[in-house]
Amino acid sequence: MIITRKAIDRRTILRGVGAAITLPLLDSMVPALTALGRTAAKPIRRFGAVYVPNGIVMKNWTPLGEGPAFEFTPTLQPLEPFRDWVLVLSGLNSKPPVALGLAAAGPHARASTRFLTDVPPKYTTGSEIEAGISVDQLAARELGQQTQFASLELGLESAESVGDCDLGYSCAYTNTISWRSATTPLPTETNPRVVFERLFGDTRTTDPTVRAARIRSERSILDSVREKIAARQRELGPRDRGKLNEYLEAVRDVERRVQKAEQQSDLELTAVEQPAGIPTKFEDHAKLMFDLQVLAYQSDLTRVITFMIGRELSGRTYPQLGVPDAHHPISHHQNSPDKLEKLGKIDVHHMTLFAYFLERLRMTPDGDGSLLDHVMIIYGAGMSDGNQHAPGNLPILLAGGGGGRLKGGQHVQYREETPLANLHVTILDKLGVPVERLGDSTGELTDLVL
């Protein structure tokens, strides 16, 4: 056997006509006979946030017991296979400073804005919006220096609303959870085709006619770089060929599903108002967007992603669950057993989709483990009880191994009034982006990290 110090560049990109494929981390990207080659690769730090709107039914969320012996509740049940990668955190709050007059309104705007910024939104419906830099963007400033995209901001509901969305607060506050600066909210992308092309394709024009022609041709991104892929595979060992084949199959599967969604969107569907490229079924849309996030992490195109399952004040209905009611109105349940039962179904459905995401991460090799081992993902809402718009005792969990930095498999109960900002400060420190203070933080959470 011949051993060489030559290694494939970690940033290798295969380019074709209107396409670019970034390779995942392969063994042959680590030089042989070096300290790095003889030891486990240092895990890449990654961060994610998944946001759900309108609060949670807390009696179905909060685990029984504390520490590692906690019992999964009905809403958390889909996460039981991932116990070792899950930290359920109770007692954290996002209570804003006392506001006066009309500024005390807008609980939904305050919920989504403070979820990652820990700063209350400025009371306005005009262009003078203001909040704070969000955790994901603080992380992206550092981690984004190593990737093609500093961050991705994704969602499942249109964020095109403008004007007043929540009692005198601009719709900008409910359209996103990501803020690049105190005055710059980042829009979310909901169309899988747009995300896919941003990651892998290059139409070289924004002309809709040209883009539509390319879509109709259904030319595969992978077919465009097929010869270069084949040449690269001949240079790889058996293990790397297996890794690359799995990755390329995942890319092709997502591409096929995007094309299928576009075909379905061309049909005469009177009850659906979805742009081309977005699956007609909510579950298909969510899974496709989750799979795109897995690909983005796996190819190291970005290490920071935020994902809104829904916007605050969301009126989405879930007839497939037997819940024809709009989400936001029934979140004001007034303790009605019927409404609470329906809300519980929605909560479990969202969690089941999140469990799908975790499984995809767990099944995707990365370095000496999986993507799930090397990511930190916040899942939760900006309010607990939607009926009361309660900003205390938020439904928050942290998923992933954090590259060996998180001590999963436990339910941690914090004392009342512990700021959510303390979790954000802790995460940033473990991502290698330490900050002294963020919003109303009072220190780090030392009992959830290794």
Image: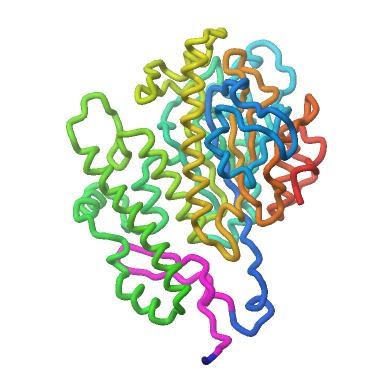
**Along the horizontal axis of the image, is 141 left or right of 159?**
right
Asked if 239 appears above or below 398 in the picture, the reply is below
Asked if 302 appears above or below 179 in the picture, the reply is below
249 or 52: nearer the eye?
249
Q: Main secondary structure of the magenta part?
A: loop
**Along the horizontal axis of the image, is 258 left or right of 3?**
left
Q: Is residue 137 visible?
A: no
Q: Is residue 278 magenta?
A: no
Q: Residue furthest bottom?
A: 2
Asked if 157 appears above or below 256 in the picture, the reply is above
17 or 340: nearer the eye?
340
Give the residue displayed 74% in from the left and 33% down from the top.
Answer: 66
Give the residue displayed 63% in from the left and 69% down from the top.
Answer: 41
> Residue 443: image x %, image y %?
82, 39
Q: Residue furthest left?
A: 268
> Residue 174: image x %, image y %?
52, 27
Give the residue displayed 54% in from the left and 22% down from the top.
Answer: 54
**Along the horizontal axis of the image, is 260 left or right of 175?**
left
Give the residue displayed 66% in from the left and 66% down from the top.
Answer: 42
241 or 103: nearer the eye?
241
> Residue 291: image x %, image y %?
43, 49
Q: Is residue 25 magenta?
A: yes
| Quadrant in which residue 35 is drawn | bottom right
> Residue 276: image x %, image y %?
27, 40
Chain part drawn in magenta: 3-30
